[in-house]
Image (cartoon, rainbow, N blue to C red):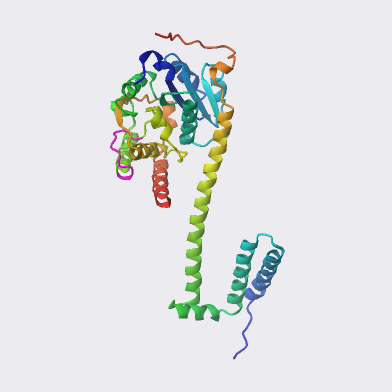
Amino acid sequence: MIPAESSADRIFVVVTAFNESRTIADVAQRLLKHYPNVVVVDDGSSDGTSDCVKPLHAHLLQHRVNRGQGAALQTGIEYALSRGAEVVVTFDGDGQHKETDIAALVRPILRGDCDVALGSRFLGHAPGMPFSRRLLLKAATLFTRVTSRVRVTDVHNGLRAFSRRAAASLHLTMDRMAHASEILDQVRRAGWRYREVPVEICYSAYSLAKGQSSWNALRIGSEILVRKVLH
Amino acid sequence: MTPPHIIAFQLIVIPVLGLLFVRSLYRVLRGYHRHASVIAAVIWLAGALTILRPQITIRIAAALGIGRGADLILYIFVIAFLVSVFYFYSRLLHLEASLTQIVRQLALRDAVSPDTREPEHAITSDRHPS
């Protein structure tokens, strides 16, 4: 258990961003109000995302070329651990997540009740979620239950929290979108205690336009299956 | 035995394959890309032989219980193609992982933390240690 006074300093929020110059400064500032250690990982953006972050009091890491969200998360997590993080929170840079949801994710970890806390929009709120997105996520949930044998309600939520030792055990190799399934897979295999926490996802026209297409989902699913065969 | 009649296809392709064979042989003897060159030489030679004497494929096919010589060629190619696909995909995955490793090392090496730099216009947060 970690004493409450030092907890804010030891909580590192890793924000991955790829061409999010429109939202990243706002996201980072809102986070910095509550958490002194915000790590922004710019995954090879070409729209000046990094420049939006430079004036702020956040850690900044840059991938020279785009490697995918999974790779950016792994980089950010390794950095946070090297700086003494006791809890690592992952957060999206596109403004879909609410920084006020982080406390509920971190609390059970600090209390020692679990090692991993996963945000779930289906337990919480997701106003304005398109029906096609809901359908896609339900299919993904079923797929994950079969392949990773993990029972969660929201398999593709970027808002998560890890205890130090759980974060240290992560080795994300699936750089692109399949990393969400890989995280669940590794959490289950390592036996980390996990729980879901209700969070809110804010759908805006901007974030919807950037979301996953159904075609992509098919590709990700087949990539996961092929990897399982090849290993 | 009746003399084999020459068709236009053979006239065009045989010299090309012959040249490729000679080039591969040259590479093998000189030691450039030896393994690949040996395989290439064998392929060009086999290609030239089967085009010059198609009966070869028919005989081999018959020995294996396959209907036509062309079918034999087809099966060999399908298998070789699939093997190649798996091989290259596997190599691709390794390359991607290596690339990510390098990009990550660079990012970690050049990381900027708030305490090591002077922000031009620092946004101060209103948190206080409790």
| Residue under the image location 37 percent in, 21 percent down | A102
Q: Position of residue A92 (x, y in %)?
A: 43, 27
A193 in relation to B86, above or below = above
Quadrant of the rendered image containing residue A170: top left
Q: In terms of depth relative to the viewer, which is nearer, A69 or A185?
A: A185
Report the residue that reaches farthest toward the bottom.
Answer: B1
Per the rendered image, the range of residues in magenta is: A146-155
Q: Is residue A47 left or right of residue A171?
A: right
Q: Is residue B57 above or below residue A109?
A: below
Spot occupied by residue A10 in the image (x, y as percentages of width and height): 43, 20
Residue A24 is at least partly visible in this image: yes
Quarter of the figure with residue B38: bottom right
Q: Quadrant of residue A221?
A: top left
At x 50%, y 56%, the residue is: B85
- Between A162 and A86, which is closer to the camera in this rendering? A86
Q: Is residue B72 left or right of residue A109?
A: right
Residue at the spot 49% in from the left edge and 60% down from the top edge: B83
Quarter occupied by the N terminus of chain A: top left
**In magenta segment, residue B98:** no
Q: Is residue A211 visible?
A: no
Q: Main secondary structure of the magenta part?
A: loop
What x and y, as percent, mark residue A28? Answer: 47, 19
Reply above or below: B54 against A93. below
Residue nearer the viewer, A21 or A208: A21
**Mark count:** 0
Please provide percent x and percent y for residue A197: 30, 26
